[in-house]
């Protein structure tokens, strides 16, 4: 052994111990026949080996001190709350808790009485509503007949929402308040996150596990789980896909501009694999004209340096790629010390009224630019190495000036074919076709809601699925709004589609919608349900999806001879067996 060997081995031993969350313990007594460096090295080595043996014992079912039981529940629509809950489960192990994860609707309110430690990650969507997989739990919890809960139930709530909406984080706030009213003990204050939630999530997580009620109950802490080999590309590390096709689907006479987008995923490999029903996250770039309007309104050159969370950045670059140029939030009004003149005022409206005179203050009042999620409209079996989207451009007039959406017009107008855009796959756990190819499908998706059902039908065609398929589609005018007409009619002719119901709301004196056709074919719809069909809905949550839901309940009552309560139970059974799924926004 050379003179440097003890130091090398000491560092190695220390690293082994640190890998397993341990500092070198004292295994070698001070009077053992070793010098200080050798004794330190042996202590480090034995600490590391002890940690490895302990982890192996726990992993193989041997005797090891267990973590304290923890229940993590989520209400998730786009997948963010579910992903955070699973991340929370891994972290809980390092804090002495053994967690189980489930959706809120997987539990009854009465089940909470048997739980001592509870964390809930609840998203709010639509007009202050709980998500689909939390709605039943939420309704029961808010009901006057909800059972009292024991003080031994220690809980904390994280909300995911959008502060530009009036009912910001209403679902999470209501759950937090109601649990307290029913007698449970709040271990840490609820944290209500805006769309940029990463920092707030980390702060809430740390505050909860360091709270007295959690810290005092913690069991044996385990080392962090090895990082699983997951996709290399995610929200914070997007893949640069190439735009290969941007083709207008809607006709020139349409009131809407809907584009078919094809992106090449060449080079992404398995890290960009997707299933039909998944969504694609797209990172847009702001319109340069709108950036210039902000600079003109503020009198800034764009060369000024501003400080973002990622570091110092030229103002123009920050406005182009990092900041939301439209949305006014309570944070905006507070940072700029202003009030809205109109309820729907946007950033430019406040700036043109002289709201800001300092570049740093400007960016501190602006929300971070976020990716947009789009339902994937292709099957990877039909289009390997590609992903397709069906995107309606958002355009409107506000305060006498033309306004537009960021991502929809970026894909359809500003991104040139051959250009690159950052993307990632957002996996869906609640909107997938059955593995059983014999199950009949009823798909309801007017307008751009057709997107996932184009993917479903491509997938079923590629798989040679035997199950029957019934598509409800429509829009304003058949002549100019019939998206994917040729493909749909080919499916009908070839027998991939067994039944096609088309609703055109402006082609006759009577306004015909998809829910109108559901009611017209009520007996057949109910027969399909009774024969095991699964129903899928994609589109607007507040109008179309709500109307379709009501129509389905009416059909079940009328055709099945059921009461309103029995129809609700029927729908709950469909949802619980994954035969009623919605991709709504």
Image: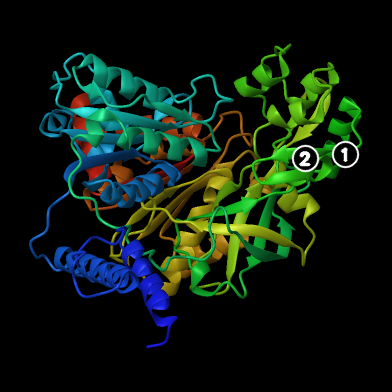
Mark before the other along the chain sequence, 2 or 1: 1
Contact between marks 2 and 1 (CB within 8 A): the answer is: yes
Q: Is residue 256 visible?
A: no
Q: Nearer the viewer, residue 338 or 220?
A: 220
Judging from the image, what secondary structure is the residue with disc 1 in? loop
Q: Position of residue 234 (x, y in %)?
A: 53, 57
Residue shown at 27% from the left, 18% from the top: 178
Q: Nearer the viewer, residue 151 or 450?
A: 151
Residue shown at 44% from the left, 67% from the top: 459
Q: Position of residue 87 (x, y in %)?
A: 37, 50
Residue named by callout 2: 319
Q: Nearer the viewer, residue 563 or 358?
A: 358
Residue shown at 32% from the left, 60% from the top: 225
Q: Quadrant of the N terminus?
A: bottom left
Q: Position of residue 38 (x, y in %)?
A: 31, 74
Q: Which mark is residue 302?
A: 1
Tell me the quarter of the picture where residue 140 sits.
Answer: top left
């Amino acid at each position: 052994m050379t003179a440097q060997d003890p130091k090398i081995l000491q560092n190695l031993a220390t690293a082994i111990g640190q890998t397993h969350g341990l500092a070198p313990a004292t295994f070698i007594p001070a009077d053992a026949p070793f010098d200080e460096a050798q004794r330190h090295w042996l202590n480090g080595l034995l600490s590391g080996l002890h940690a490895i043996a302990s982890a192996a014992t726990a992993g193989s079912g041997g005797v090891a001190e267990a973590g304290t039981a923890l229940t993590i529940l989520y209400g998730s629509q786009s997948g963010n709350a579910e992903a955070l809950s699973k991340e929370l489960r891994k972290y809980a192990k390092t804090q002495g808790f053994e967690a189980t994860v489930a959706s809120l609707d997987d539990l009854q309110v009465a089940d909470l009485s048997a739980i001592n430690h509870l964390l809930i990650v609840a998203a709010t969507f639509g007009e202050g509503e709980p998500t689909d997989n939390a709605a039943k739990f939420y309704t029961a919890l808010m009901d006057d007949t909800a059972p009292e809960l024991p003080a031994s139930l220690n809980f904390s709530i994280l909300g995911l929402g959008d502060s530009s909406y009036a009912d910001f984080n209403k679902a999470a706030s209501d759950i937090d308040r109601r649990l307290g009213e029913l007698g449970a003990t709040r271990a840490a204050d609820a944290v209500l996150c805006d769309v940029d939630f990463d920092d707030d999530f980390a702060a809430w997580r740390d505050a909860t596990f360091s709270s007295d009620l959690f810290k005092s109950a913690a069991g044996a802490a385990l080392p962090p789980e090895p990082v699983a080999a997951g996709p290399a590309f995610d929200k914070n590390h997007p893949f640069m896909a190439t735009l290969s096709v941007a083709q207008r689907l809607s006709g020139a006479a349409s009131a809407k501009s809907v584009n078919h987008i094809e992106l090449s995923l060449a080079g992404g490999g398995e890290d960009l694999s997707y299933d039909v029903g998944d969504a694609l996250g797209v990172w847009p770039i702001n319109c340069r004209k709108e950036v210039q309007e902000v600079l003109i309104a503020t009198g800034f050159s764009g060369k000024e340096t501003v400080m973002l969370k990622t570091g110092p950045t030229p103002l123009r670059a920050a406005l182009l790629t990092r900041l939301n140029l439209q949305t006014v939030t309570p944070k905006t009004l507070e940072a700029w010390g202003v009030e809205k003149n109109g309820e729907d005022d946007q950033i430019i409206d406040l700036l043109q009224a002289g709201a800001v005179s300092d570049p740093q203050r400007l960016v501190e009042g602006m929300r971070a630019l976020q990716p947009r999620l789009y339902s994937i409209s292709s099957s990877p079996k039909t289009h390997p190495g590609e992903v397709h989207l069906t995107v309606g451009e958002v355009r409107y007039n506000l305060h006498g000036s033309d306004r537009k959406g960021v991502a929809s017009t970026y894909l359809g107008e500003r991104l040139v074919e051959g250009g690159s855009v950052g993307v990632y796959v957002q996996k869906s756990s609640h909107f997938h076709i059955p593995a059983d190819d014999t199950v009949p499908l009823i798909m309801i998706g007017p307008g751009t809601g057709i997107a996932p059902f184009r993917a479903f039908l491509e997938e079923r065609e590629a798989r040679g699925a035997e199950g029957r398929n019934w598509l409800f589609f429509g829009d304003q005018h058949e002549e100019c709004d019939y998206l994917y007409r040729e493909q749909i009619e080919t499916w009908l002719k070839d027998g991939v589609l067994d039944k096609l119901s088309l609703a055109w709301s402006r082609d006759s004196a009577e306004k015909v919608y998809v829910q109108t056709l559901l009611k017209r074919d009520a007996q057949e719809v109910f027969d399909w349900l009774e024969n095991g069909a699964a129903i899928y809905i994609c589109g607007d949550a507040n109008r179309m999806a709500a109307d379709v839901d009501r129509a389905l309940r009416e059909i079940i009552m009328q055709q099945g001879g059921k009461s309103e309560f029995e129809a609700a139970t029927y729908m709950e059974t469909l949802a619980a067996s994954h035969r009623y799924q919605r991709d709504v926004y």
